[in-house]
Image (spheres, rainbow, N blue to C red):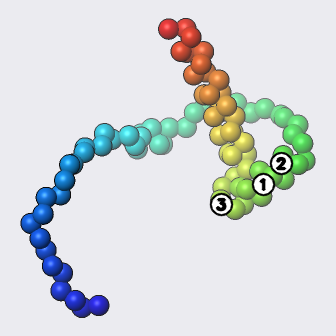
Amino acid sequence: MNSKIKYTDESIGKIEIVPDFLPSPEELAYREEGVKVTLALSKKSVEFFKAEASKHHTQYQRMIRRLLDSYVEAQEKPRNRSSK
């Protein structure tokens, strides 16, 4: 474990700078305005989301909300492309 480290003067190779793709802290703190709705879901769906939420230490309603938001984003992309 205490073996000496051997350093060399070899070239590191091609270095690529990766653009910053992470959202800013302000974007992470942003909470989109919510609208409360009453929605009847199947027992099977609710049980699934509750079990998955428990595994991932989150709220099942948050998972459902994110799923719906993802669906909306996916549906909006083709519409935006065709309108240009």
Quarter placement of the N terminus: bottom left
Task: Name the residue that disc number 3 marks.
Answer: 57
Residue at figure coordinates x 78%, y 54% from the top left = 50
Which of the labelled discs sits on residue 46, or is there none? 2
Front position in the image: 46 or 2? 2
Residue at figure coordinates x 84%, y 53% from the top left = 47
Q: Is mark 1 on a helix, strand or loop?
A: helix
Front position in the image: 81 or 35? 81
Q: What element carries label 3?
A: loop
Vertical placement of residue 83 versus 47, above or below: above
Q: How crowded is mark 2: few (under 14 residues within 10 Å), some or many (20 or more)?
A: some
Vertical placement of residue 84 versus 47, above or below: above
Which of the labelled discs sits on residue 60, or is there none? none
Type of amino acid at the residue the image marks with label 2? Val
Report the Cα–Cα distance between label 3 and label 2: 16 Å
Type of amino acid at the residue the image marks with label 3? His
Residue at figure coordinates x 81%, y 52% from the top left = 48
Which x, y percent locates residue 72? 65, 27
Which x, y percent locates residue 33? 61, 31
Front position in the image: 26 or 46? 46
Task: Name the residue that disc number 1 marks.
Answer: 50
Which comes sooner in the sequence, label 3 or label 1?
1
**Dot 2 and dot 1 residues touching (CB under 8 Å):** yes
Q: How crowded is mark 1: few (under 14 residues within 10 Å), some or many (20 or more)?
A: some
Left or right of 56: which side holds 12?
left
- How many numbered badges does the structure rendering display? 3
Which comes sooner in the sequence, label 3 or label 2?
2
Which x, y percent locates residue 68? 69, 34
Q: In which quarter of the image is residue 58?
A: bottom right
Type of amino acid at the residue the image marks with label 1? Lys
Front position in the image: 4 or 63? 4
